[in-house]
Image (spheres, grey):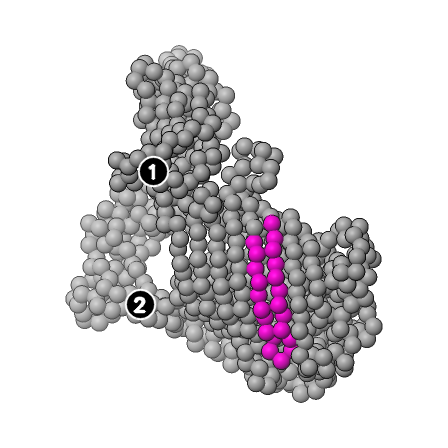
Amino acid sequence: MLAGKPQINTILLKALISVCFIAAFASCTIVKNQQPGKPYVYKTNINLIGNFSNDEKKELQARLKEQLDDSVRVRKVDKLLWSVLKKPPVYDSSSADQSLIFMKALLKSLGYFNDSMYHEHKIDTVNKDEYRTTIDFYVRPGKVFRLDTIVYNIGHAELQHLTDSTIKEAYINKGDPFAKNMISAEIDRLTELYRNSGYLRFNRDELIGVWDTLNIELLRPTLDPFEQLEILQKLREKKENPTVRLEIRLRNPDSTRFLKYYVGNVTVYPDYILDTLDLERKVSVVEDITVIQHRNKFKPKIFPSNIYLPRGSVYQQRRYLRTINRFTSLGTWELVGIDQIPRRNQDTVDFVIKLTPAKKYSFNTNIEGSVNQSAVSGNLFGIGLNVGLQNRNFAKAANITNTNARYGVELGNTGGDNFIQTRQLSLTHNIYVPRFIPFPKLIPERIKDNFRTILTSSIASTERRLYYDLLTANIAFGHEYQRRNLLVTTKLLNIEFSDLNKTKKLDTLIEINPSLKTIFTDGLIVSFIGNVTLTGGRRNALNVFRANFEGAPLFAGWIRNDFLDSQLYRFIKIDAEFARLIRYRKAAVALRIFGGIGIADPFNTTRNPNKVDNLPFFKQYFSGGPNSMRAWAIRRLGPGSVVKNFTETPDRYGDIQLEANVEFRFAIGRPFGIALNGALFTDAGNIWFLKQAAGRPDEEVFKFSRLGTDIAIGTGAGLRVDFNFLILRFDYAYKVKDPTPSPENAALKNKWFGYHIFAGDQFQLGINYPFIW
C-alpha cells in the first residue's frame, strides 16, 4: 500500500517537465492578420529614468502606459497556453509623438514640470512580409514640485471661518506634491463644505487656485557678499527641491451666489408619472410634509422618517443627497427626483419630491447550480429549481417581501449507488422593513438608515437518502446593520422545530453504534443568533472576517415543564473565519483559517440525556466536500483520528472544527472567449467531539496533546471555467495525511503520502471559488 521514493521522484520529474513545457508555450505570442509588408507595433516599453522605489516605479509606469495613443497600443488576447495579437496597428511615428504629449500632460498633473522624454523604435524582420516594431519610451520625470506655502484667501467672512475651522480636513498639506488631482479634490471639499452650510447656489467654479514658484525674497538686491552667497545657496536648493506657493481664493467675493438658504416647504408625490397630473389628488399633511397622491398606494405616515429636510433648518446638501439615496435604496420606487425651488428674493428653498413607483410584483424562476452550507444538505454541488415572488410595497409601507420555493438535489458519489445523496423541498417568506422596530428612536439619527428589520419564516423537507427524513420549520425576528465594510445581522428571537424520521437502516446503525443515538435527535431550538462580517484591505489584498454566535438559550433553566425538558436544546455555538486574497497581475493567493466550537448544555440545565453530549446534528460541523477538505468526500472526514467503517457511520459530525486552506490561482487562457483558470491548493483540518460520551472512542474527542496527530492534510489541483455569471470548478485532491481511513486502509493511518497516487484521491465539482473571491 505504500508508495516508494522512486515513484514519488518519477511523479515530481514528470510534473517538472510538464511545467517547463507549459511555460515554454505560455511565453509565445502568435500574430494574426497583420498588414503584409508594413511594420506593425509588436511591443511597447516604458523606461523610467530617475530614483524611484519599486512600488513608485511600477505605479508610474502603469499610468504612463495608459497614456499611449491607440495606434501604438498592443492588445494581446490570452489563450490556453499562448497569447494572440490580432490586427496589430501599423507603426506610425506621429502616434508615438502624440503619446509623448499625453505622457507630458500626465506628469504635469502629478507635479513633474521639468520632465524630458523621447522614443526610439526597432524593427525586426520575421520574414519578407512581416516586420515587428518594438517602441521604447524613455521618460525622465525630473524633480517633483512640492507645496511650500498654502494660503486660503476666501474674502468672505463666514466662508473664511468655515475654511479655517476645517483646515485639518484638507486634502493638501505643506510638502505634498503639487498634483492637480489633489488640488481639485480640495476645491471639491470646500465646495461641499459651503453647500452643507446653507450656500445652495455655490459651485466649484467660484474658487480658483493661483500658484507661483518664485520666492520674492530671492529677488531683493543686496551688496553684502555674505547675503549674496546665502541667496545663491537658496537658489541652488530651490533648483534641487522645487517648491510652489498656492493660494485658493474666490473669483468674485461680491457674487450674489453667497446667499445662505433655509428649508421651506416639502411636498411629496409618491406615485408621480406624467399621466397622473390631471387626475384627482388626495392631499395629506404629516409632520410638515405634504403628501399628494392619486391612487392611494402608500401610507402618508411613512414619508417623514425618510425625509431629512426639516422645515426652518439651514440648507445642507448632504441632507438633500441623503434623502435621494434613501428613497433609491428602498427599492419601492423606480425613479427618484427632488426639485430645489428657491423663492424669489428670499432666503428660503422649497423641495418637491417626485417618486415614480416600480412594479409592485416581480416573478422569477431559474434552474441553478448551488452550494448549500448546512450539516443536513452539506456543501456539495447540487442542482435546484427556484421560483420566487417579490412584493416591493408590502402593507403600503415600502416594505419588501420575498417568497421563494425551491426544490434541490445534492449530488455526489460516496460509494455504492448513492449518487443522489439529498433531496430538499423548501418554502421561505421574508419581510424586510427599512427601519429599526419596535423602538426606532433608540437608534441615533446619523446611522438609522443603516438598519432594517427582518422577519423570516420557512419550512423545509429534507430526505437524506437511505437514512432519514427531516422536517424543519423556522421563524425568526431580527435586524441587519450595514455601514461601509461592516455587516451585522442579528436574530433576536430564532425558533426552530425539527421532526426526524429515521429509516430502518439508521436505526440499525444506532443499534451497532449507540453513540449515534445522541447525535441524530430532533426537538426545539429557541435561540439568539448574531453574525458579523468585516471586509477590508488595500490595493491588491482583500480581507474578509466573519464571526457567528448562537445561544440556545441562556435563560432556559428558568422555565421547566415536560415539553421543554424533553424537546428543548440548550447550547452555545461560536465560530470565526478569516480569509485573505492577495492579487497579482494574472494570479492570486487565497488564504483561509476557520475555527468553531459548540458546547451542548453549557449550564447543566438539560433534562433529556440525549441532548446533553452534542449539538443537534443539523447544527454540528462537518468536513470534506468542495468548500472544505477537498481530498475527502462530504462528511467523510473525522472525527479526530478514529478508524470506523463508513457503512456503520456514513456521516461524520463534530462539535469542534479547525481548518486552514491555501490556494494559488493562476490564469491559463481564454479559448473561445471563456476564461480558464487553474489552482494548486492544500487543505488541513478536522472535526472533533467536545465531550466524552458512552460508547464514544477517545480518539474522537478533542485534545490539544493529540492535535498534530488528528490533523488531516490534502493537496491537489483544479480547473475553473469562468462564464462571467457562473464559475464551474473541478478539483482533484490527494490525501497526504489521513487520520480517519477506512478499516481496510487502517495501516495508512497518519502515514505521509501513504496512498498510491490514484487510491487516496477525490474529485470535487463545485460552484464559484471557495473561501473568498
Residue 552 in the image: state x and y as whole percent: 71, 55
Residue that mark 1 sits on: 294
Residue 593 in the image: state x and y as whole percent: 63, 59
Callout 1: 10 Å neighbours few (<14), some, many (20+)? Answer: some
| Residue 464 included in the magenta stretch of the image | yes
Tell me what residue is drawn at x 37 percent, y 31 percent. Answer: 283
SS for callout 2: strand
Looking at the figure, which quarter contains the N terminus? bottom right
| Disc on res. 84 | 2
Distance from Cα at disc 2 to Cα at disc 1: 61 Å
Tell me which corner region of the image, top left, top right, bottom left or bottom right, holds residue 40. Answer: bottom left
Counting residues from the start of the chain, the first of labels 2 and 1 encountered is 2
Q: What residue range appears in magenta?
A: 456-477
Q: Is residue 770 above or below residue 757?
A: above
Q: Amino acid at mark 2?
A: Val
Q: Is residue 129 above or below residue 248?
A: below
SS for callout 1: loop
Using residue 234 as the reference point, say whether residue 760 is left or right of it. right
Q: Is residue 269 above or below residue 137?
A: above
Q: Decide if residue 75 is in sight here.
A: yes
Tell me which corner region of the image, top left, top right, bottom left or bottom right, holds residue 192. Answer: top left
| Residue 292 included in the magenta stretch of the image | no
Residue 697 in the image: state x and y as whole percent: 80, 75
Residue 17 in the image: state x and y as whole percent: 48, 78
Using residue 141 as the reference point, say whether residue 753 is left or right of it. right
Tell me what residue is drawn at x 37 percent, y 17 percent. Answer: 347
